[in-house]
Image: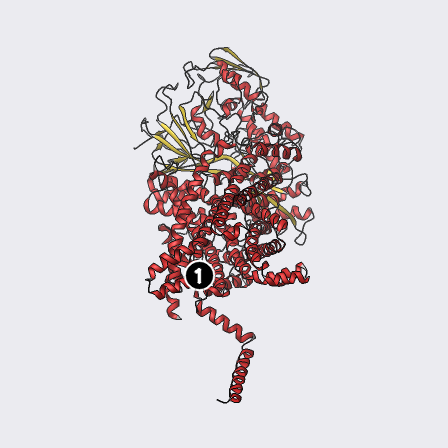
Amino acid sequence: MIRRVIPFVAIAALLLAACAPAGPSAASPTAAPTGAGTATTAPTAAAEQPKPGGELTYIVTAEPPTFDAHQSTTFATLMPVSPQYSLLYKLDPADNVSKIVPDVADGMPTISADKLTWTVKLKSNVKFHDGATLTADDVVATYEKLRNPPQGVTSPRKATLAAVESITAKDATTVEFKLKFPSGSFQAAIASPWNYLYKASRLKEDPTWYAKNVEGTGPFVFVEYVKGSHWAAKKNPNYFVPGKPYLDSLKAFFISDVNRQTTAIQSKQALIEFRGFTPQQRDQLVRALGNEITVQESPWVCTNYIAFNTKKAPFDNVKVRQALNLAIDRWGGGEALSKQTIVKDVGGLMRPKGPFAMPDADLEKIPGYYRDAAKGQDEAKKLLTEAGFSASNPLTFTFLNRNVTTPYEPLALFTIDQWNKTGLIKATHLAKETAAYLADLRNANFDVGLDFNCDYFDEPDLQLAKMYSASGLGKGLNFSHYDDPDLDKMIEAQGHETDAAKRKQLVNDIERYVIGEKAWMVPVVWWYRVIPYNTRVKGYVIGSNHYTSMDMSSIWLAGQ
Amino acid sequence: MGRYLIGRLLLMIPTLLGVAILTFILMRVVPGDVVTLRYSQSGSVPQEVIDRERKQLGLDKPLQDQFVDFMGQVVRLDFGKSLWTDRPVTEEIGSRLGITLELAILAAIISTALAIPLGVIAAVKQDTWVDYAVRVFSIGGLAFPSFWLGILMILALVVWFRWAPPLQFVPLWEDPVANLAQLIWPALAVGYRYSAVATRMTRSSVLEVLREDYVRTARAKGVGETLVVVRHALRNSLLPVITVISLEFAFLFGGLVVTEQVFNVNGLGKLLVDAVAHRDYPLVQAIVLIFSSVFVLVNFVVDIFYGVLDPRIRYS
Amino acid sequence: MSSQAAVASVHDSEELARRRFLDDQGWPRARRAVRDFIRQRPLGTFGAAVIIVMAIAAIFADLIAPYGPYEGVFTGLPEAPSLAHPLGTDPFGRDVLSRLIYGSRTALLVGFTSSLVGSTLGLALGIVSAYFGGKVDEIVQRLMDILISFPLIVLAIAIVAVLEPGTEKVIVAITIPVIPRVARVTRASGLAVVRMPYVEAARSVGVRAPRIMAQHIAPNVFAPYLILMTAFLGQAILLEATLSYLGLGVVEPDPAWGNMLRGQGMAFLDQAPWLAIAPGVAISLAVFGFNLFGDSLRDALDPRLRTA
């Protein structure tokens, strides 16, 4: 009996040993990752001179559903396709946050005294990849398509050009925009990364041509797109900026599996991924590749909101909403969550550390943002008791979420934990598949839900667009489904204010109103972008978002 | 024989039709649609934009009308265009079918190459530690979660050899080394898994045959054991083994979905998961039909095989 | 020996045999069967041991687990294994060992329910199909073919998307593919039995269909049914893990092994490998156990494969 058992025990032992994973980590598990690596918000402007040549291999984590950025709302279009196109204005790649510089335009626009006429001059040496010269007609046709799309064409960002009354080509290199009202966001609108410049004649023939075809004036020329695999482009020898682009060619690999993305960079199959990695991915790469990895980190113009279905009791009661808002310890939570997922900073309705952000001292006065977490919990309990809830009769509801790990799951678990800690709430997690989750949000088929928003710019018109009344301009955007005409007026007012300081004041007032007074929808924690990339990649500045500066014209490769 | 074949062939049609209808029902019953998904990524897309697109794609029509349209397409064998990319479904599926097929065949080869020798050895050395080792090893294929195995595999390659399988697919005839360098790993993972059933089938089949009278006679005549096994036992025990391997191939096809995700193989499985997540009805229909057709076809082939070999079945 | 004495000695040995047979009933016989099983089939015994450990963990989780499955101090990072937490904690500060123990409850619940319900329904369909033959058989076969050839992923996503996610929906999603697979096998076995003369006899005498199916056919297909059920129990646990990997399984914060692998588990593979090893080993061991036990059960029940 014993004799028969021994070999089989040996096999079992071998198997168990084989089950241990590969890698040095198996021998000595560390309690916490070292998090080492150069974490800078902007690389020191090195005295290094850009070297021409080389191929940039990068990862894009989803495939482009369309090549026409006018119709797209996903980075999956911008990342592979932007290198082939140019914009009127763009974010300065050396800053990538708020500094706008001309792209195809020749200098900043001339603005009339009444701020209603914007004149833009164009460079005269801009050529499409087939040799044709870009003229004012092309710009006019492009922007007409954006603000007034023809039948059968969609323009999701039509509203960003709502201030425009007319666009005319004064001559071959001059475009004139006439506005209905002075708009604080117009400069950002014509620097939008989505507004690729197209050829007028193509648009006239077939306005949907650009959805499946690529032909631009950008620094790179399209080579091939193998669906599901990669996108390749090569240097445009006739680019209108002499000396650029530095790179010879680009190759974007489409990889959706998170672990495969990390191993691709770890094995140097790809040099960089432009959207953002989790802290764990960063730590893994830093541990494996040491100083062959550079890390850039920055706050992100993306956040999650808690949406309350105000059409359903008791979420129509401001006390209940306010209680749910107060119970969350944002400062402690942000700190802890930032170690395991892509969130970090605490902010109001505008990106923390951005141009419209409220200083922390002011933020801490808003309900839900107290530094003293216990105070928040106490006030929450008080409001809940006033609303009629108790330990034996807790506020019970489901928290609708997306079944995505980063950062939705940890955020939801954290928030639910905070709510249940009060003892007067019983919240359960309901994570649905994205399509089903979106349907529920839109159809007001939920109790409380985790909403999200991402933009390319710190621009109140963009970030506050969701807050409009649900039956008005907020239709399809406002998932708390409330109507608030006072708020509508406040948002409109800031949109017409052109003095920067006054505008910031108005925006901060809106934040105090929406979060502190009405608790219509409240942000949890803002996202945080971490990009660990191969040190050979130079000329990339992380900026505040993952949509802009994707034309790769300033990027160059060191080493060989 | 001819009648038997035609009979079996005709039976495939109602099955595939049933699959198509089931897919239609499932996809329509599930909440969410492609338009909301497309515009959900960033920024604010007003409701009217979404409504307009929906109308364009015909998604706002009542279910009965959509079903009629669908049946019309089925009759014309028109697979339509992908709702997500607006390209013909046949174009989307195109090259990916070849990749998945190659992966499946590679996995089947590996599975067979593992199963038959291991099964025979285990049967011949029944109840010894060799037998136990083989059985434990083969059940491992069924026990380890395939995605877990896959991730660990790639991590092991990267950490120990600083090498990862190529990201880009190169057809076998263009560059067999690059092609295999990418596909051998997922093929191993899947092949190992599917060898489990085949190994045990081989083992029990060989065991059965080894007890037959003619084998006893051969042994009594003094024929060497190896010859007994190879010449007599193996040949006669292969029939059920081949059946199992062929049937498993059909299941293997469907099982490639998760493996393709993990190894980032640009195949039909990965496309299916994306298509379902996007609620891309025409694409889902087409891919599901392909999977089902493979399954039904393989069964058909096995049935013919049996009909040829066993006259009793033909005439029943 | 005289004929009388011969007859007497035969009677004696018959009496002896009768006594021995009567003594060897009930518990002593069961004990002997178990002892033989352990002695002859060490792999199967190992499998049974694993199952028993799992069952104990599942039933007595509240007593055995050092912490609750949801409690933890949220610090943001997982902790390495220590005396307080033998398998460390996950990023939410929850004890991995405790969640593993409670997870076995989910695993057994999901596995047992879906394989039991699925196999029984499959058994019923297979028997009905085999007994009635003809049109009924054709229709049931077509339906089973449709279900079997349908990719599991689409089915699972559809089920989970329509019904809201949760453990019960996972059970439904896993039960459905089991049914046609069991139906196929039991139909094949059932067909063999249906052709037997005694079934013909019963039918001609006028015994009603349900009685024939239950009394004659069912017992003869019971062995494959049992074996399939244990096999699918293991596969169900694996399937739950795969569905969780795709985000369609048991929802956080409920503890389930597949759940523990998804997302946070695999994300920390480099820095906190125990998060991924522990549930992975648990799943593999469970499936191993069920398969080894099922295999040995088949060997034990199928007389043709006995070594003795």
Above or below, C241 relative to A208 = below
Above or below, B120 relative to A334 = below
List the residue tagged with mark 1: B208
Where is residue B236? Give x, y as percent.
Answer: 42, 56
Q: Nearer the viewer, residue A527 or A487?
A: A527
Image mark count: 1
Residue found at the far top of this picture: A171
Mark 1 belongs to chain: B
Q: Using a 10 Å C-alpha cutoff, classify the residue at mark 1 as few (fewer than 14 neighbours), some (14 to 19) or many (20 or more).
A: some
Q: Specify whether residue C85 is in view.
A: yes
Q: Nearer the viewer, residue A227 or B77?
A: B77
The kind of residue tagged 1 is Glu
Quarter of the image that includes the C terminus of chain A: top left
Where is residue A414? Give x, y as percent.
Answer: 54, 47
Above or below, A109 relative to A12 = above
Residue found at the far left of this picture: A560
Q: Which quadrant of the figure has residue A240?
A: top left
Residue drawn at the location 34% of the way across and 65% of the way down: B221
Helix, strand, or loop for circle 1? Answer: helix
Viewed as shown, does residue C27 lie left or right of B123? right
Viewed as shown, does residue A461 lie left or right of A248? right
Where is residue A532? Give x, y as percent.
Answer: 40, 38
Q: Nearer the viewer, residue A453 or C293?
A: C293
Above or below, A485 relative to B204 = above
Q: Specify whether residue A366 is in view.
A: no
Quarter of the image that includes the N terminus of chain A: bottom left
Applied colour scheme: secondary structure
Where is residue B105? Give x, y as percent.
Answer: 42, 44
